[in-house]
Structures are given as structure tokens and as C-alpha cells.
Amino acid sequence: MPDVKRDEVGRRVFQLKQQQSVDGAMAIMRTAQGRKWNDISEEDVGSLRLMIEELWLEVDRETWKRYSFSRLTLNDILSIVRMGYSVKNGTLPKKEALNQLSEICGRTTSDA
């Protein structure tokens, strides 16, 4: 197999792992919030997803596995949504937002 194809396959596998992990986290949050999830707009869900995708890229897999997304409160989720909007419009640096997000998610681990 040529190197280009191998590289492309590797990138695609990485993207699929990210997508599956983020989809799983989003499903857990949606289930844990129950009816309250309906109060979150599709646009807000997109902002939340953006930040969760960035978090997945930032943290190592062991840290990711320790996060308990079901323990995030609605206020936590809405804070993450606002962070996503702030990053998108340039009022909050991505690195700072990821530090805040890591702190929020870090409180959900059994180690916390």
C-alpha cells in the first residue's frame, strides 16, 4: 500500500475514533439531562459539540476515559456552550477555554 494511502487511512481512523468518542459523550449528556436537554437549541448543541471535539483532541485517552459526562450539570453544559460561542467569535482564546473545560470535566472523575 502506498504511503499516501496509509497516511490517509490513519487520518480517517483517527477521525472516526474522535467522532465515536464525541458522539458517545454527547449521547451520555443528552440521556443524563433528560427533558432538560430539550431546552438546549440545536445551535447550542453544535457549540457544545465543538468544544467536546476540541477537548478530545487536547487530552490524552486515559484522561478522556476518566471523564463522567453524565455528571455534568445543566449549568456546566451551558457554560461549555458559552465557551464555544466565545471561542468561535474570538473573545476567548481556545487554550483558555480548553483549560476551563478540562477543569469542569475534571470535576466529574471519580478522582475528583
Image: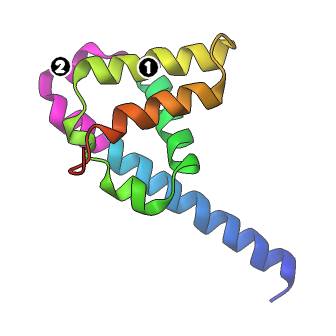
Depth check, front residue: 89 or 46 = 89
Q: Position of residue 16 (x, y in %)?
A: 54, 60
- Packing grade of label 1 (10 A; few <14, some 14-19, many >=20) is many
With respect to residue 100, does 16 lie above or below?
A: below
In-front residue for pair 101/52: 101
Q: Circle 1 is placed at which residue position?
A: 81
Left/right placement of residue 21 relative to residue 34 reads right
Q: Nearer the viewer, residue 59 or 47?
A: 59
* Extent of the magenta region: 27-44
Per the image, is 35 magenta? Answer: yes
Locate the N terminus and report the quarter of the image it occupies: bottom right
Image mark count: 2
Residue 15 visible in this rendered orientation of the protein: yes
Residue matched to label 2? 36
Image location of residue 110, percent across then percent down: 20, 50
Q: Residue at x 59, y 58 (%)?
A: 15
Q: Please provide percent x and percent y for residue 49.
A: 46, 34
| Amino acid tagged 2 | Lys
Number of other residues with Cα within 10 Å of mark 2, as a class: few under 14, some 14 to 19, many 20 or more: few
Pair 1/2: label in front: 1
Q: Position of residue 54 (x, y in %)?
A: 56, 40
Dominant secondary structure (helix, strand or loop) of the stretch shown in magenta: helix
Which residue type does callout 1 highlight?
Val
Asked if residue 81 lies in the magenta stretch, the reply is: no
- Above or below residue 83? Residue 91 is above
* Residue appearing at x 16%, y 35% in the figure: 32
Q: Is residue 79 above or below residue 68?
A: above
